[in-house]
Image (cartoon, rainbow, N blue to C red):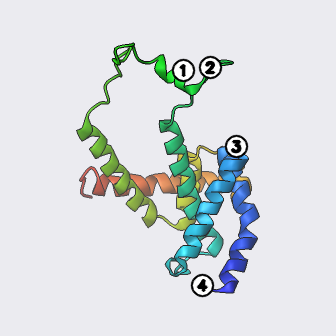
Amino acid sequence: MTLELHRDIEHLRPALVRFAMLQLRNEAAAEDVVQETLVAVLEKPDRFAGQSSLRTYVTGILKHKIIDLMRASKREVQFNTADGESEADVIDALFRPDGHVVEMPRAWGSPEATLEQKDFFRVMEICLERLPAKTARIFMMREWLELDTAEICKELGITTSNAWVMLYRARVQLRECLDLNWFGNRP
């Protein structure tokens, strides 16, 4: 691991934190995902093959860390406690004195459908990796991170019309890739 890589990554840190703040709107969470990203890059520096700029490579890792955090936070339940009430009180209210739940949990759905959905997202990731890096990035910013066009254009330094063209191309290429690799439609 070279001193030069450390220095280059340290110069990227402020921009990475700003990018994470745009997505997460939480300073502590943004700092955490940036730190995780930098650790991931520094732990395996040989994974950076130089096919893109270091900034693009590190930002790509950061995007995945942000998405992972967003997905995890959707699965977590925050306890809202009233004044003088502890989390234990909230949990205890979910159960009767005999230990049974007050209300049955709702059905979790079909495990087969969940597995199929995971398989779909694996194919989707492969299709995204086949896109040009900037095209994949703008697609992810728009569709996964749900940034508006103005934020994307500001972040990437492009015009609105350029952004829409790139999004159109990404959608066309992804549709073709998914048609072939997921739906099995041959050209």
Which is more N-terminal, label 4 or label 3? 4
Q: Earlier in the sequence, mark 1 or mark 3?
A: 3
Q: Nearer the viewer, mark 1 or mark 3?
A: 1
Callout 2 touching callout 1 (CB < 8 Å): yes
Local crowd size for mark 1, using a 10 Å CA cut-off: few (<14), some (14–19), many (≥20): few
* Residue 36 position by quadrant: bottom right
Name the N-terminal-most of marks 3 and 2.
3
Find disc 4 in the rendering and name its residue: 1
Tell me the quarter of the picture where residue 157 sits.
Answer: bottom right
Compared to 43, does 175 lie above or below? above
Cα separation, mark 4 vs mark 1, equals 50 Å
Which residue matches tag 2? 85
Q: Name which residue type carries label 3.
A: Arg
What is the C-alpha distance between the residues marked 3 and 4? 32 Å
Q: Are marks 3 and 2 in contact (CB under 8 Å)?
A: no
Which sits earlier in the primary sequence, circle 2 or circle 4?
4
Q: Amino acid at mark 1?
A: Asp
